[in-house]
Every structure is written in C-alpha cells, then in structure tokens.
C-alpha cells in the first residue's frame, strides 16, 4: 500500500513538474516572443527610420527624385553600416514619430527631446546634441539674455505645445505671450511686426535664417543658457543591445566632432554659412 501510494505520489509530482515546465516555457516565449530591434535589424538587414520631409538640416526629400538627404540621413546611413543594413524611410512628423515607434513601424527616430511624457511611451539614447534656445527678433533689437526679452512691453511668439512655449513662459514670464499653431505662422507674425520676438531652438532658428536671411541674425540667449538634450528615439524593449550600440556610436561620433560636422553640412543645405553660427553654440 505504501509503495502504491509512493508510486502514485511520484506520478503526481512528475505530472506537476511537466505542467510547470510547459508553463515556464510558455511564459518564456510570451516574455521573449517579440523579436528585438537588434535581432530584427540583423536578420532583415533593414533599418527603418522615421523620415521627416522638409525638416532641414535633419531631413530633406527631393520632390523630383525622391532621394533623401540631410544630417539625420547621413547619421542613419552610418548607423546602418554597423549592421550591414540598408535604410527604409517611413515618412512621419515629429508628432507621429513616437507613435510609429510604439507601433513597430520604425526602429529609430532622430532629434527628439526626451520629455517625461514621451519617456512613458518610448526609449531614448544618450544625447545626440545639447540643443540651446534663443530667438529671432525684430529689426534693431539685439537681445543677448532672457532678461532682455522678459519685459511687459514685448510680444514673444512661439508655436503652441512645443518646448519653445515652455521655455518662453518659464524664462520670459513678464512678456506678452503669443501662441501660433505652427512655427511658420510665428515667423510670419515676426516679419509682419505683430510680435517682437520668436523663440526658437538653435538649429531651427539658424535654418529659418538660412532660408530667409532677412530674418537674421539668430540670437542665442544666455543668463541662463537654456539647453535640452536632443536624442534618438527607440522602441522600449527588454533587450538593450540596440540601445547599447547606438549609445556607443553617439558617444564616439560626438567625441570626434563628426556629429557637429554632419549638422553643419545639413545647415549648409539651407544656406547657413559658418559665420552665421554663433560662436558660443556647440553641438
């Protein structure tokens, strides 16, 4: 009787162990079922990037040939070489880039500020650049500090919902704030004299001056120098190998000045000359 019970007990234990083993394997497959970005790029030899038409110096698409160019394209091509991969362009905007990463439409998005809200949805690399803020100003007005524009008699423009709005309200709270739906509308308001200042991050401000020199010069505002990191956006996933490769690539290319060179080349595409880049501006 004892042996019979023992055999039955051993059988039950074996059955339970078998069920547990199957459950553990199933759980492991569930946890690791989604192919990581690192493995997918290595397998397909395709790196999918969010591409933003008309966003020089980072992106530009030739409407005749369909060819892409710009600083972000140069960077993406260099990253693709690491994996012996080719680029696949998924047309997007800064707003949809985050959604495209979440929905696995792209592997990589360039020039994104890692706001806490975005960090809830996607991952970020080390900084690509530390991106300072400044402004375009009406003719004859040459602000150098935030205090220069933080005055009740001045109208300060920005595009709504952007970091331009955030820094304008934080560092020029006494000014009259005027929000516009797009950056272009804010620039037009400055040109027509409806506002005195338009807040823009350095790359965007320099690009605007390059396209229309009559807007210049671009004024880098200090005291304090307000600068935020601009990073590469990636999918949030347990496997960190893709992020690790990108971080090593960024640290290396920032250290040797290659990222600055790519950005200056991109700015040159919109007519920005080296002497138009403020001496205090570093990438």
Image: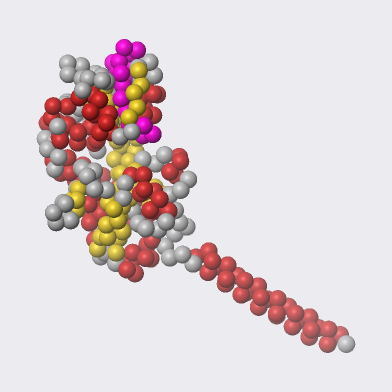
Q: Position of residue 10 (x, y in %)?
A: 75, 82
Task: Looking at the picture, tell me which residue is in the foreground, 98 or 65.
Answer: 65
In percent of the image, x 14 and y 40: which residue is there?
270
Query: Quick check: is 233 in the magenta stretch?
Result: no
Image quadrant in which you'd find residue 87: bottom left
Number of marks drawn:
0
In percent of the image, x 42 and y 56: which residue is there?
103
Q: Position of residue 272 (x, y in %)?
A: 14, 36
Compared to 251, does 192 lie above or below?
Answer: above
Compared to 107, does 150 lie above or below?
Answer: above
Query: Quick check: is 147 in the magenta stretch?
Result: yes
* Residue 94 appears in the picture as rendered: yes
**Which residue lies most toward the top here?**
153
Task: Looking at the picture, tell me which residue is in the foreground, 9 or 89.
Answer: 89
Does residue 256 appear to the left or right of 115 in the view shown? Answer: left
Compared to 245, does 255 lie above or below?
Answer: above
Does residue 25 appear to the left or right of 257 in the view shown? Answer: right
Image quadrant in which you'd find residue 57: top left
The magenta region covers: 145-162
* Residue 252 appears in the picture as rendered: no
Q: Quadrant of the C terminus?
A: top left
Does residue 70 appear to the left or right of 230 in the view shown? Answer: left
Q: Quadrant of the N terminus?
A: bottom right
Task: Looking at the picture, tell me which residue is in the foreground, 164 or 10.
Answer: 164
């Amino acid at each position: 009787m004892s042996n019979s019970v023992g055999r039955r007990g051993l059988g039950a234990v074996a059955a339970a162990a078998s069920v547990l083993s199957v459950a553990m394997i199933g759980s492991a497959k569930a946890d690791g079922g989604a192919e990581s970005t690192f493995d997918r790029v290595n397998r397909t030899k395709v790196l999918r990037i969010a591409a933003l038409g008309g966003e020089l110096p980072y992106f530009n698409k030739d409407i005749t040939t369909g060819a892409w160019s710009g600083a972000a394209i140069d960077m993406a091509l260099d990253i693709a070489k690491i994996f012996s991969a080719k680029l696949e362009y998924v047309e997007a905007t800064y707003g949809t880039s985050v959604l495209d990463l979440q929905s696995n439409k792209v592997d990589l998005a360039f020039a994104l500020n890692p706001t806490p809200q975005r960090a809830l949805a996607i991952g970020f690399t080390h900084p690509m650049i530390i991106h300072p803020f400044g402004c375009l100003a009406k003719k004859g007005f040459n602000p150098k500090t935030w205090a220069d524009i933080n005055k009740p008699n001045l109208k300060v423009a920005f595009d709504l919902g952007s970091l331009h709005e955030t820094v304008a309200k934080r560092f020029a709270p006494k000014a009259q704030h005027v929000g516009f739906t797009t950056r272009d509308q804010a620039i037009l308001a400055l040109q027509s004299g409806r506002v005195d200042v338009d807040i823009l991050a350095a790359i965007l401000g320099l690009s605007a001056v390059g396209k229309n020199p009559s807007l210049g010069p671009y004024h880098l505002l200090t005291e304090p120098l307000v600068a935020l990191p601009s990073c590469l956006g990636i999918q949030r996933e347990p496997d960190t190998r893709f992020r690790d490769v990108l971080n090593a690539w960024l640290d290396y290319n920032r250290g040797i000045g290659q990222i600055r060179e790519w950005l200056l080349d991109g700015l040159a595409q919109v007519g920005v000359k080296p002497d138009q880049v403020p001496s205090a501006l570093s990438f």
